[in-house]
């Protein structure tokens, strides 16, 4: 994640003030001097000085300049240090949470370290508590880091979970309305005239919580429409590996896929087998990843609001840290995006 230029100037000046290079009452470089030093516009250097003023580090006097305040008066609010761990950085198969969380951190003058889950493999709970004020944890596997998370819960350290709930721990979770999403995708196919609609899993040995919830939404739509065919969760052929055999055995005409990657893989397999999408099969995904609208045909999918997920997680964590009140679990609405991988079906 690229650091804004004004933030680089802000951090350099903040460190210099803390280190005593600019003692109380001393004058900082002007906007013009900073813009020349950092090779940035005057607007950028002005923004950095405005942020320092807002943080209580300096006072700005029109026509005179910017001056360091007396830090002994404890006017400066200590910046919260937030740790945000994700399975993989810059992974196209995870949405862009930073678009939502970064403005929240900047508004609250909090520092955030975004890193991968591997970072926690080298850390003890006491180290996390000493270095950070709170943690946003993307739950990829509900057993991963369970000992570390449990110890953090014992010590009442603020942790907000993202994407999945860990029911054994007292941490609030920010998740998408997965069940609604599975229902919406299935309902679309039913409205288009499909009666034999399969659910396609990625092939993992155990299904993640989010996938099970999407599958439950699929079941709900199938039952409400009183259709006879239903994919069973234990059916080992209802995966990308067993796709062609599953179609032959059950004569399905459409698939609700657990996510976009599963859907895109299925489309590729079907094309290679000589089928056409959506003439022969309608396909829906889940997540609305960047790749979903780039494939041919563009994929009908359920969009998670990654921006709002990140924003809500950040807002809840800051509120917990500052007010010592544990937030509630929250579900973020999803939306169906109809593209060209689905079409009307006539028996």
Image: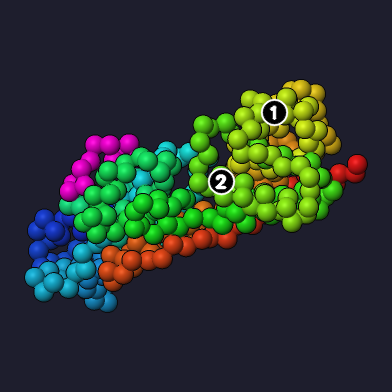
- Mark 2 / mark 1, whichever is N-terminal: 2
Point out the frontmost of discs 2 and 1: 2
Question: Who's the residue at 32% across and 36% down the image?
Answer: 118
Q: Which residues are magenta?
A: 117-127
The C terminus, quarter of image: top right
The residue under the point 48% across, 38% down is: 91
Q: Residues within 10 Å of mark 2 (few under 14, many from 20)?
A: some
The quarter of the picture where residue 290 lies is top right
Taking the magenta stretch, the answer to whether it contains residue 94 is: no
Q: Which is more toward the observer, 264 or 74?
A: 264
* x, y percent for residue 56: 22, 71
| Residue labelled with disc 2 | 212
> At x 50% / y 42%, what residue is drawn?
208
Mark 1 element type: helix
Question: Which mark, residue 137?
Answer: none
Q: Residue at x 81, y 45 (%)?
A: 195
Res. 110 image quadrant = bottom left
Question: Any mark on residue 243, and which?
Answer: 1
Q: Nearer the viewer, residue 343 or 38?
A: 343
Give the colouring mode of the picture: rainbow
Nearer to the camera, 235 or 290? 235
| One can see residue 108 in this view | no
């Amino acid at each position: 994640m690229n650091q804004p230029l004004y933030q680089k100037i802000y951090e350099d000046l903040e460190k210099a003030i803390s280190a005593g290079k600019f003692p109380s009452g001393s004058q900082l470089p002007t906007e013009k001097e900073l813009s020349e030093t950092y090779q940035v516009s005057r607007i950028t250097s002005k923004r950095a000085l405005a942020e320092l003023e807002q943080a209580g580090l300096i006072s700005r006097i029109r026509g005179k300049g910017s001056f360091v305040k007396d830090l002994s008066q404890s006017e400066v609010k200590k910046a919260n240090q937030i740790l945000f761990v994700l399975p993989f950085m810059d992974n196209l198969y995870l949405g862009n949470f930073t678009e939502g969380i970064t403005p929240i951190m900047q508004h609250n003058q909090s520092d955030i370290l975004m890193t991968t889950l591997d970072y926690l493999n080298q850390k003890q709970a006491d180290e996390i508590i000493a270095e950070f004020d709170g943690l946003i944890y993307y739950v990829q596997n509900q057993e991963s880091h369970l000992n570390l998370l449990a110890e953090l819960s014992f010590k009442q350290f603020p942790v907000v979970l993202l994407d999945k709930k860990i029911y054994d721990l007292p941490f609030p979770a920010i998740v998408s309305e997965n069940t609604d999403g599975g229902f919406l995708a299935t309902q679309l196919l039913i409205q288009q005239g499909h009666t034999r609609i399969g659910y396609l899993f990625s092939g993992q040995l155990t299904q993640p919580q989010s996938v099970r919830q999407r599958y439950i939404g699929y079941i709900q739509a199938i039952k409400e429409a009183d259709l006879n065919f239903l994919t069973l969760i234990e059916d080992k052929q209802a995966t990308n590996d067993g796709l062609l055999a599953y179609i032959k055995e059950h004569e399905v005409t459409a698939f609700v896929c657990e996510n976009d990657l599963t859907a895109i893989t299925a489309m590729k397999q079907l094309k290679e087998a000589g089928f056409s999408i959506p003439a022969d099969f309608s396909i829906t995904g889940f997540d609305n990843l960047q790749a979903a609208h780039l494939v041919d045909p563009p994929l009908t999918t359920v969009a998670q609001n990654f921006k709002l997920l990140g924003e809500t997680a950040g807002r809840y964590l800051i509120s917990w840290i500052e007010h010592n009140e544990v937030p509630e679990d929250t579900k973020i609405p999803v939306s169906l995006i109809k593209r060209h991988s689905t079409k009307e079906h006539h028996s």
